[in-house]
């Protein structure tokens, strides 16, 4: 994922290293570079990063250095990670008041890579202390002080203010100043988006896409079974080149990848008009958006060895366990006796989801993960039968399903964008010596976040914060270090390093070939 900014005034060459260093400090894991003229900056975000938090953090940091940074609407052609439509990035609403009017400076903020534990609901956090101070080291009555500042602006400010915007901006600044690199405040819209990302159902036309450069557009690499796109005749390999119809039509090349994805969003029953390029010809479709299942697991038989099943897991959401079992059973029925689990670029996800998936490989009562909280208390998860109702029903595990895939020979494909729950998946299989690890060192995120819904207090939005760190069965926490394959790293060949991972053929993917060889 990348961000593009224009920056003014154009910084002197002598200050460019300072600016790039400030961005790297603000968003750990991010890399940045200037355009030749120094007027633009491209920022590559780490896997699973919260784009909105990154945008605010970088904007505020540059403001503190004396520069005005504005996000560019058009994204130059690059190779982003896979995107599941309609999991688009939230677009920012026009602001009626510049944030610099309200916030003079902001401490460095880093980004969330993923949420291992996704806890929602009313949890009393003791946010109203007796002293009314801000945090544990505050000395002033912050609620009263905010009221005074607000009254001054209300009575004397020349410019009209937007109360909701000010409140949201203040809360984002509060979270940023806590020093929790994975914390975030979500507005009502952002919170709804976060919830939908973890759910098994989304509104859309049912396609999985990456960016295409020839032709410029949105390449469809997967069509979800039973989706409106499948019913309309959309095929994997199609490239969306135009969105909309009549006077409202625009080309993806003109609008840019991220903005075009946003345009594909809509309500249930609304129509998505797209024109795709297929085998040199253009075909147009009018597709009614509907509730579709979010696909996080896909499987296929290896082209090189019909006894090897390749299972790709893009994230761990609440319907991942059911999809995982379905793909495994299909591949076993097709004669697969060995498996490669590809979690490259998997940013993590839901704790219950990963516990359920790992239960398929472990013996009953095997330790999966131990979480250590602020007060020193611990909580452990084991492979055991468990039944959930409601949204989490798909994470239920029957007694007979525990360990059902344990005895198959396995390899796990990892890279630097394998994070959080995906790292736990990797670590558990390695700790129990159930799989060979192939690829490169993982991201290194061994801490857990919880998301708190603010509605029990009568407010919209939500808060995410780090609540503990978690250890795999070995007890060795990998936060900040990552997990490295025992036999050493296997880098992608130079010839394909700049090609989108999801567009690699099996013949091109030397890491995949190494994984298949490892389980011979």
Image (spheres, helix red, strand yellow):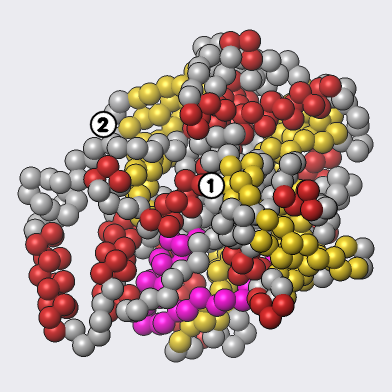
Front label number (1 vs 2): 1
Which of the pair 94/376 is nearer the observer?
Answer: 94
Instruction: Indicate whether residue 2 is drawn in magenta.
Output: no
* Quadrant in the rendering for residue 299: top right
Q: Kindly identify the residue that appears in the image at 51 percent across and 75 percent down.
A: 71
Residue that numbered label 2 is attached to: 375
Identify residue for label 1: 197
Does residue 5 sit above or below 201 in this rendering? below
**Residue 454 at x, y percent in the picture:** 30, 47
Left-right relation of 206 to 448: right
Q: Position of residue 30 (x, y in %)?
A: 53, 61
Q: Quadrant of residue 340?
A: top right
Asked if marks 1 and 2 touch (Cβ < 8 Å), the reply is no
Count of all numbered marks drawn on residues in the image: 2
Q: Which residues are magenta?
A: 51-78
Q: Is residue 258 visible?
A: no
* Front in this rendered view, residue 227 or 252: 227
Q: Helix or strand or loop: what does disc 2 sit on?
A: loop
Examine the rendering and report whether any part of residue 299 can be seen. Answer: yes
């Amino acid at each position: 994922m990348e961000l593009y900014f224009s920056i003014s005034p154009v910084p002197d060459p002598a200050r460019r290293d300072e600016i790039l260093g400030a961005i790297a400090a603000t968003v750990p894991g991010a890399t940045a570079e200037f355009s030749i003229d120094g007027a633009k900056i491209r920022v590559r975000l780490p896997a699973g990063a919260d784009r909105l938090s990154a945008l605010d953090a970088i904007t505020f940091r540059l403001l503190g250095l004396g520069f005005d940074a504005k996000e560019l609407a058009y994204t130059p052609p690059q190779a982003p990670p896979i995107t599941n439509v309609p999991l688009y990035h939230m677009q920012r609403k026009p602001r009626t008041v510049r944030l610099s009017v309200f916030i003079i400076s902001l401490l460095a903020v880093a980004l969330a890579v993923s949420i291992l534990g996704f806890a929602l609901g009313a949890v009393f956090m003791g946010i109203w202390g007796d002293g009314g101070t801000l945090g544990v080291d505050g000395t002033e009555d912050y609620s009263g002080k905010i009221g005074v500042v607000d009254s001054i602006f209300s009575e004397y400010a020349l410019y009209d203010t937007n109360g909701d915007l000010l409140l949201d901006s203040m809360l984002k600044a509060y979270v940023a100043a806590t020093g929790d690199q994975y914390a975030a405040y979500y507005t009502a819209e952002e919170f709804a988006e976060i919830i939908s990302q973890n759910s098994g159902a989304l509104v859309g036309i049912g396609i999985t896409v990456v960016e295409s450069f020839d032709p410029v557009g949105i390449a469809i690499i997967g069509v979800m079974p039973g989706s409106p796109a499948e019913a309309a005749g959309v095929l994997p390999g199609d490239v969306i080149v135009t969105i909309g119809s009549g006077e409202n039509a625009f080309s993806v090349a003109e609008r840019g990848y991220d903005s075009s994805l946003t345009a594909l969003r809509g309500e249930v029953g609304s129509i998505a008009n797209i024109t795709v390029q297929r085998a040199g010809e253009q075909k147009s479709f009018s597709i009614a958006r509907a509730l579709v299942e979010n696909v996080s697991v896909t499987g296929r038989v290896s082209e090189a060895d019909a006894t090897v099943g390749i299972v790709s897991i893009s994230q761990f959401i609440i319907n991942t366990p059911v999809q995982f079992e379905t793909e495994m059973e299909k591949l076993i029925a097709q004669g697969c006796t060995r498996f490669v689990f590809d979690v490259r670029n998997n940013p993590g996800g839901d704790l219950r989801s990963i516990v359920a998936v790992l239960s398929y490989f472990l013996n009953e009562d095997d330790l999966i993960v131990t979480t250590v909280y602020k007060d020193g208390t611990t909580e452990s998860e084991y492979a055991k039968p468990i039944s959930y109702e409601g949204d989490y029903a798909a994470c239920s595990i029957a007694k007979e399903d525990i360990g059902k895939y344990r005895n198959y020979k396995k390899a796990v494909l990892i890279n630097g964008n394998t994070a959080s729950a995906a790292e736990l998946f990797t670590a558990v299989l390695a700790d129990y010596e159930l799989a060979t690890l192939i690829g490169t060192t993982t991201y290194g995120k061994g801490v857990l976040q919880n998301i708190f819904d603010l509605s029990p207090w009568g407010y919209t939005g939500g808060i995410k914060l780090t609540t503990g760190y978690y250890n795999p069965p070995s007890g060795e926490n990998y936060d900040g270090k990552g997990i490295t394959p025992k036999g050493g790293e296997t880098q992608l060949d130079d010839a394909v390093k700049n090609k989108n991972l999801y567009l690699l053929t099996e013949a091109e993917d030397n890491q995949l070939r190494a994984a298949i060889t490892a389980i011979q």
